[in-house]
Amino acid sequence: MSKPAPPGAPGFVSTGSLPSRDDVRAIIETAYARFREERSGTVADYIPVLAEADPAAFGICVANTQGDAFALGDADGTFSIQSVSKPFVFALVCDALGAEEAARRLGVDATGLPFNSIMAVELRADRTTNPMVNSGAIATTSLVGGANAEERWQRVRDGLSRFAGRTLTMDERVYRSEADHNQRNAGLAHLLRGYGRVYCDPDEAIDVYTRQCSLLVTARDLAVMGATLAGGGVNPATGEQVIAPDTCRRVLAVMATAGLYERSGSWLFDVGLPGKSGVSGGIVTVSPGKGAVATWSPPLDAAGNSVRGQLVTRFLSEALGLNLFVSAPARRS
């Protein structure tokens, strides 16, 4: 059923709600039991500290837009946010510059190529990609306001903390390990500078981006962050208006087309929702108007997406009635 949109949102919006609390809890318990023994995938090891992750770690959290959270397993275990940070930093930049200007500078089209692809930049005539892959994410971080790296970093951390509803901290070991092994990202940043598509000193952009990826979160945090995007930019835990409603729809559109990298089409076909994955094994998935699903399970597939997280999210999307493309036959009078 539609209802008038809040101030700042266009026209009417489609809204809904999750099933009852008891039903949500029971469905999550079923998902956890069904997939807890899944052993497919490999823990990321191209950043040495990430190879230390426990492959058995497994957490689920579903948060709605009213402030309820339903967590199970290792939902409060901490891990570095990695690429799941990308849509939230993009949201901050859209709010600051306007979505159209951000899209012009960054691009929004899916690349169909791996997340760290250099060819993705070279194949585009305007040398943009999108904020969900590394080249576009580095460019996004370079657009965060600040006179230097420290000011940019503070704005990123404060902004993502507002999404989470608590102060997030950086894992120094992850940061150092990534900084010692991010030559490819550094190469991307300097390539972008040559094309005028990084908007501050490239080494400064890489440093802030690396810190950004090293923020510690939990599946519960990611669920709240996703529910903020689902609820017109209002954090359901704190009630704060973190970003504008119009920004949410722009961010969710890019997540839907590019959030799972070259598997994004398959993801949308199977799950029917905007999502974003990270190499630590986190996935956040957003159901506009309803809430968000977050999972944490470190073993990844070849594209860098959590195997168990994808299975759980597909199950929950169907069981909770979240898929954006599901409809019932119209009744004729």
Image (cartoon, rainbow, N blue to C red):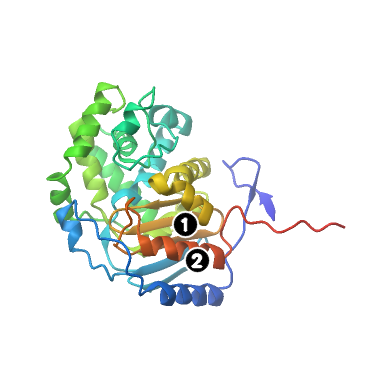
Residue 62 sits above or below residue 325 on the image: below
Question: What amino acid is at disc 1?
Answer: Ala
Q: Residue 157, can we see it?
A: yes
Residue 149 in view of the camera: no
Residue 127 circle label: none
Residue 227 bears which disc, if any? 1
Number of numbered discs present? 2
| Structural crowding at the residue carrying mark 1, measured as other residues with C-alpha within 10 Å and reported as few (<14), some (14–19) or many (≥20) | many
Residue at (17, 50) in percent of width and height: 175
Residue under label 2: 315
Callout 2 environment at 10 Å: few (<14), some (14 to 19), or many (20+)?
many
Front tag of 1 and 2: 2
Q: Quadrant of residue 97?
A: top left
Q: Earlier in the sequence, mark 1 or mark 2?
A: 1
Looking at the rendering, in which quadrant would you find the N terminus? Answer: bottom right
Can you say which quadrant of the picture contains the C terminus?
A: bottom right
x, y percent for residue 248: 49, 45
Q: Residue 147, image x and y in percent?
A: 23, 31
Q: Are marks 1 and 2 in contact (CB under 8 Å)?
A: no
Which residue is rendered at x = 22% and y = 38% of the image?
185
Q: Is residue 74 above or below residue 11?
A: below
- Residue closest to the eye, 256 or 112: 112
Q: Amino acid at mark 2?
A: Phe
At x 38% / y 23%, what residue is drawn? 126
